[in-house]
Image: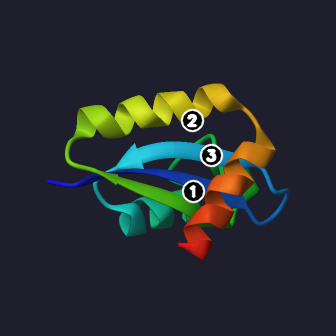
Amino acid sequence: MKYFTYILQSEIDGSFYIGATSDTARRLLEHNFGHSPYTSKKRPWKIIYTEEFDNKTEAIKREKFLKKQRNKDFYLKLSNNLKNA
């Protein structure tokens, strides 16, 4: 099963949320319908970056790395690289 690390950006205030999942479409819906306490107050969200992995362990490892960055410019650069790929 494939797993993904993703970055969401709030369309309200531009803040970011980073997570890992096996289904990005389902997870985005959960965030936008308020099923996650952290993201419910800043809806709607859009996916600005995804990265695919062969297993859950690697996706979570990448998620933790991205969360440690805490750098808006870094996240936007990843997003722009995805758009230009």
> How far apart, in angstroms, are the residues tagged by discs 1 and 3?
14 Å
Q: Please report the residue visible at 42 percent of the width from the left and 54 percent of the height from the top.
A: 51
Q: Quadrant of residue 48?
A: bottom right
User: Closest to the observer: 57 or 22?
Assistant: 57
Residue type highlighted by circle 1 = Gly
Q: Please report the residue visible at 49 percent of the width from the left and 63 percent of the height from the top.
A: 28
Depth check, mark 1 against mark 3: the one in front is 3
Q: Earlier in the sequence, mark 3 or mark 2?
A: 3
Find numbered disc 1 in the image and state the secondary structure of the residue it sits on.
Answer: loop
Q: Earlier in the sequence, mark 1 or mark 2?
A: 1
Find numbered disc 2 in the image and state the secondary structure of the residue it sits on.
Answer: helix
- Residue 53 lies left or right of residue 24; in this view the side is left
> How far apart, in angstroms, are the residues tagged by discs 3 and 2?
10 Å
**Residue 59 placed where, x, y %?**
34, 40
Q: Earlier in the sequence, mark 1 or mark 3?
A: 3
Residue 34: assigned label: 1
**Residue 14 placed where, x, y %?**
81, 57
Residue sticking out furthest to the bottom: 84
- Residue 1 lies left or right of residue 51; in this view the side is left
Residue 66: assigned label: 2
Q: Please report the residue visible at 14 percent of the width from the left and 53 percent of the height from the top.
A: 1
Residue type highlighted by circle 2 = Leu
Depth check, mark 3 against mark 2: the one in front is 2
Q: Which residue is mark 3?
A: 17
User: Closest to the observer: 31 or 66?
Assistant: 66
The answer to whether residue 77 is above or below residue 18 is: below
